[in-house]
Every structure is written in C-alpha cells, then in structure tokens.
Amino acid sequence: MEKNPYIELAECLLPEEMIEYFEVVKVEKTAETLDVTLEERDNGVDGYEAGQLRPNGFYDESVVRDYPVRGRKMSFHVRRRRWIDTETGRSVSRRWNLVAEGTRFSKEFAAFLKGLLGQIPDYGPLS
C-alpha cells in the first residue's frame, strides 16, 4: 500500500525521537496551519517483560507547536499510550521530554525563538 505523501513529508519534518516512538496517522492542511496527528507506537515500556503490559488506550491529546512551514503554523497533536501492568494493575506510560519547560513549543523551536528573540513568546503570530 502506498503511503500518503503528506504523511511522508510530515515524517521528514519531525524531530528524530518522535519518528522512532510515534507514528504519523493524519495530516491536515489549512490556509493558516499544518496539523500533524501522532500516536505513540505500541512498543511497550523499558523495564517490563513481554506480556507484562496490556494496552489501555491513550491519554488526552497534547498539542505541541513547532517551526512554521511556508507561512503555516505547524502543530503536532500527540496521543500518548498507556498500559496496565497485568501483575499490579497499575497504569504505566513512557515519560517524554518533547516540549520546552513551561511552554507548548518543541524543544528545538523554543531554543530557536529564545536565541532569536531573547525570550519565548506566549502571544502573537508565533504562539
């Protein structure tokens, strides 16, 4: 089956750690935005044996802003998985460090803005 060209392009734009752990499931383009929906791959969690975790859906979607593309605001809509430990019944998930602390920007985009502007804007055309 041939891959959607928008999805292939979105994969080229993603930070490397996102490509490894997340799958692009949808790309939507409007006159003002490029929205990429990502779902965490079902690769389990480090430290747990095969079969010890049972899938238990997804957390609510988080939106992460990234570099604009051709004048469009780019947002990643991230759906993180959760699992249940079959031995303890506890909920388990991976810990991610995808956004800059105190922002909704990707780490790389936040560092770029801080270097360019001296701060990370929380309003205006970039926010």
Image (cartoon, rainbow, N blue to C red):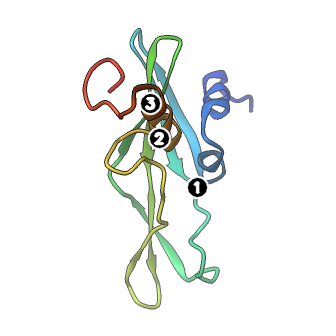
Q: Furthest-bottom residue in view?
A: 87
Quarter of the image for residue 105 reads: top left
Q: Is residue 17 left or right of residue 105?
A: right
Which numbered mark, 1 or 2, is in the foreground of this view? Answer: 2
Q: Is 42 in front, or is 111?
A: 111
Instruction: Specify the label residue 110 is tagged with.
Output: none
Mark 3 packing: few (<14 Cα in 10 Å), some, or many (20+)?
some
Amino acid type of the residue that numbered disc 2 sits on in the rendered structure: Ser
The relative height of residue 49 versus residue 99 in the rendered view (above or below) is below
- The quadrant of the rendering that contains the C terminus is top left
Q: Secondary structure at mark 2?
A: loop
Amino acid found under the numbered disc labelled 1: Arg
Q: Which residue is mark 1?
A: 41
Of mark 2 and mark 3, the one earlier in the sequence is 2
Q: Residue furthest top?
A: 31
Q: Which residue is mark 2?
A: 106
Instruction: Residue under label 3, please give it.
Output: 113
Q: Mark 3 and mark 1: span between their CA atoms? A: 30 Å
Name the residue rendered at 36%, 45% in the picture: 62
* Real-space CA distance between mark 1 and mark 2, rounded to the nearest whole angstrom: 19 Å
Label 2 to label 3, Cα distance in Å? 11 Å
**Residue drawn at (54%, 38%) of the image:** 25
Type of residue at label 3?
A: Leu
Please tell me whether residue 93 is drawn above or below residue 41 in the rendered image: below
What percent of the width, then of the height, locates residue 18? 59, 47
Q: Residues within 10 Å of mark 1 (few under 14, many from 20)?
A: some
**Looking at the rendering, which quadrant does residue 77 occupy?**
top left
x then y, percent, for residue 16:
66, 45
Q: Residue at x 61, y 23 (%)?
A: 6
